[in-house]
Image (cartoon, coloured by chain):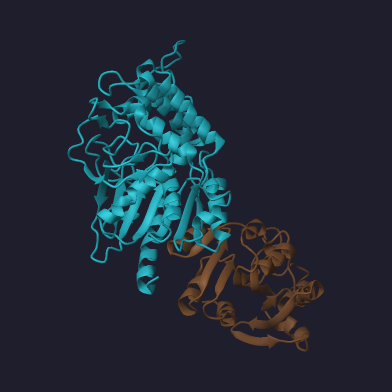
């Protein structure tokens, strides 16, 4: 399983209700329901992936988070997870708003556009960067709204969203991000995992 | 109709209060089973049939000699794997395959009951079938499943008996029959009722039946079960055993010939009055209204796991109507899965060989059965 999922599952308390938005093949859902005894639901846009999840007995609904989060009542989940998909929405701001409405806590993973390799690519090659987490060309990328860990940090502060914890992930290495090391971590982290509350 | 002597049935002795206000008792409910009930009695699946189905979901129907209506889904190694599960399917009341219906002979007159049969609802059908749990001494079903009107019965069953099924599979259905669907049903009924042989529903069931009307009803309905694309690809403007148009009203086109054939074989196996009663039951189905306009309330008490399936080309029970059920379930935090299967086969997809549909359902059922047993949910 991806290191990111291990970090996310550590953030989740036992016996809680979890919604995995953009749950993909359901790998995280399966891990959570087996190891954390949580009650977990999924929302996924790809038919193929939904079929895979349902074949594994997971409670996954086919849908688009941009429209289909509306059907979930306020605070109906203890945690809502959004792993590396925020940048693909038409309106990330509205999706975050909905996530915070549905979940008591929200876990968001950001592929960090501030990583030094990306900065170097753009600076020296003058080309849009292609990396492991962002493997697309500029003309076929589903990622409409890329941001850095710093950007998302600023966004949360501006919108009055409480940040409980930020974890930096670089390869297998995890570290805590604080206000004092933010600038540096924004340079060396591939992913930023945010634990948020309204 | 052939004789029903060899058909399995139970006699429901205690009175059943129908939605129309009347009460029925001592009436037969015909059923069939596939596979074996295990010792723990935790592997039973109650399958509900659609408008023109019957209890013979799998194998060969002993009366019509045709293949069971859900042969693709029910059987050894299939989605409803009869090597694992005990599948029960009953003929709905109002039907014409041995259950109490308008074709049942009234011993006093020696004629079919006809339109003296009370108007029944989906709720009445489900309440009658609930007696099968007592008959088999099953405390809790593993699953209830069905497509189209079968799906409506699934929803009604879970609403009436919240903790009697661990899993519910409503397929290609709705919680509230739409105006368009009522309209199509009315078209079918009018076709039957305008056949001179219908005689206000009191035809003898032997010599003169409203076959022409029933055949037209079937033809019209059959179109609604297919998709435009499916029809176009299968028939297009192909001509029927002729090289040119005949400038008359014979079946020039293959699609005409196909529909005529569908109509003609249908009348051999189905009773016109049953068609009236069952379509009426579908039209009256409105689970949302039953719960004061809030569909979520229908499932409030239930711990059932739901798996809802719709088909992209189904315009009779479109994805949007299936999704309304998903939304109502999510609103109360129910355990629900939903997928829309991509296919050109229209509403009929649930009866056909649609591999994506059948394999997802098969895997879901077997994994969920294992999970429930392991975790003792």
Locate residue A191 relative to residue B40 in the image: left or right: right
Residue B217 shows in this picture: yes
Residue A49 shows in this picture: no
Identify which residue, B223 or B217, lies in the foreground.
B217
Vertically, is A52 above or below B148? below
Q: Quarter of the image holding residue B359?
A: bottom left
Colour representing chain B: cyan
In this view, the residue farthest toward the top is B247
Vertically, is B244 above or below B33? above
Identify which residue, B215 or B352, lies in the foreground.
B215
Q: State the quadrant of the N terminus of chain B.
A: top left
Q: Quarter of the image holding residue B36?
A: bottom left
Identify which residue, B258 or A170, lies in the foreground.
B258
Colour representing chain A: brown
The residue located at (39%, 44%) in the rendering is: B124
Q: Position of residue B61 (x, y in %)?
A: 25, 39
Tally of numbered tags: 0
The residue located at (48%, 37%) in the rendering is: B283
In this view, the residue farthest toward the left is B5
Q: Position of residue B32 (x, y in %)?
A: 25, 47
Identify which residue, B86 or A133, lies in the foreground.
B86
Q: State the quadrant of the C terminus of chain B.
A: bottom left
Q: Position of residue B119 (x, y in %)?
A: 41, 35
């Amino acid at each position: 399983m991806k290191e990111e999922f291990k970090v996310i599952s550590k953030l989740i308390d036992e016996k809680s209700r979890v919604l995995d938005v953009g749950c993909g093949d359901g790998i995280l859902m399966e891990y959570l329901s087996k190891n954390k005894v949580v009650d977990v639901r999924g929302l996924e846009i790809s038919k193929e992936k939904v079929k895979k999840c349902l074949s594994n007995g997971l409670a996954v609904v086919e849908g688009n988070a941009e429209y289909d989060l509306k059907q979930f009542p306020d605070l109906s989940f203890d945690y809502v997870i959004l792993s590396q998909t925020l940048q693909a929405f038409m309106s990330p701001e509205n999706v975050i708003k909905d996530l915070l409405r549905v979940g008591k806590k929200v876990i968001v993973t950001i592929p960090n556009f501030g990583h030094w390799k990306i900065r170097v690519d753009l600076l020296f090659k003058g080309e849009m960067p292609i990396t492991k987490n962002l493997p697309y060309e500029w003309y076929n990328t589903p990622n409409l709204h890329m941001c850095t860990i710093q950007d998302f940090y600023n966004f949360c502060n501006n919108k009055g969203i409480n940040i409980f914890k930020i974890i930096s992930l670089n390869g297998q290495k995890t570290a805590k991000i604080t206000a004092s090391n933010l600038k540096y971590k924004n340079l060396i982290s591939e992913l930023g995992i945010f634990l948020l509350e309204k | 109709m052939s004789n029903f002597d060899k058909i399995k049935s139970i006699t429901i002795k205690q009175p059943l209060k129908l939605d129309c206000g009347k009460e029925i008792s001592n009436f037969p409910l015909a059923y069939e089973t596939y596979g074996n009930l295990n010792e723990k009695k935790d592997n039973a699946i109650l399958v509900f049939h659609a408008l023109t189905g019957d209890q013979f979901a799998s194998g060969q129907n002993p009366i019509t000699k045709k293949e069971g209506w859900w042969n693709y889904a029910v059987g050894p190694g299939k989605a409803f794997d009869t090597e694992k599960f005990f599948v029960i399917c009953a003929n709905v009341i109002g039907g014409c395959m041995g259950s109490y219906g308008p074709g049942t002979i009234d011993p006093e007159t020696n004629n079919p009951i006809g339109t003296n049969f009370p108007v029944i609802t989906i709720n009445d059908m489900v309440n009658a079938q609930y007696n099968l749990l007592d008959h088999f001494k099953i405390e809790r079903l593993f699953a209830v499943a069905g497509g189209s009107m079968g799906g409506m019965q699934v929803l009604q069953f879970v609403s009436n008996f919240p903790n009697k099924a661990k899993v519910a599979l409503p397929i290609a259905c709705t919680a509230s029959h739409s105006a368009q669907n009522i309209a199509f049903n009315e078209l079918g009924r009018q076709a039957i009722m305008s056949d001179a042989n219908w005689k206000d529903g009191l035809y003898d069931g032997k010599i003169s039946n409203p076959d022409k009307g029933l055949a037209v009803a079937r033809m019209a309905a059959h179109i609604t079960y297919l998709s435009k694309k499916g029809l176009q690809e299968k028939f297009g403007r192909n001509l029927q055993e002729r090289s040119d148009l005949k400038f008359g009203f014979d079946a020039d086109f293959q699609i005409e010939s196909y529909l005529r054939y569908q109509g003609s074989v249908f009348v051999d196996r189905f009773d016109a009055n049953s068609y009236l009663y069952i379509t009426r039951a579908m039209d009256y189905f409105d689970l949302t209204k039953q719960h004061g306009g809030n569909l979520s309330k229908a499932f409030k008490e239930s711990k059932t796991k739901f798996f809802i399936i719709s088909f992209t080309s189904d315009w009779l029970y479109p994805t949007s109507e299936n999704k309304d059920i998903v939304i109502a379930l999510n609103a109360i935090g129910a355990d629900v899965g939903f997928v829309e299967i991509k296919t050109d086969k229209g509403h009929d997809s649930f009866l056909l060989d649609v591999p994506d549909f059948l394999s997802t359902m098969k895997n879901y059922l077997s994994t969920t059965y294992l999970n429930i047993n392991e975790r003792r949910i």
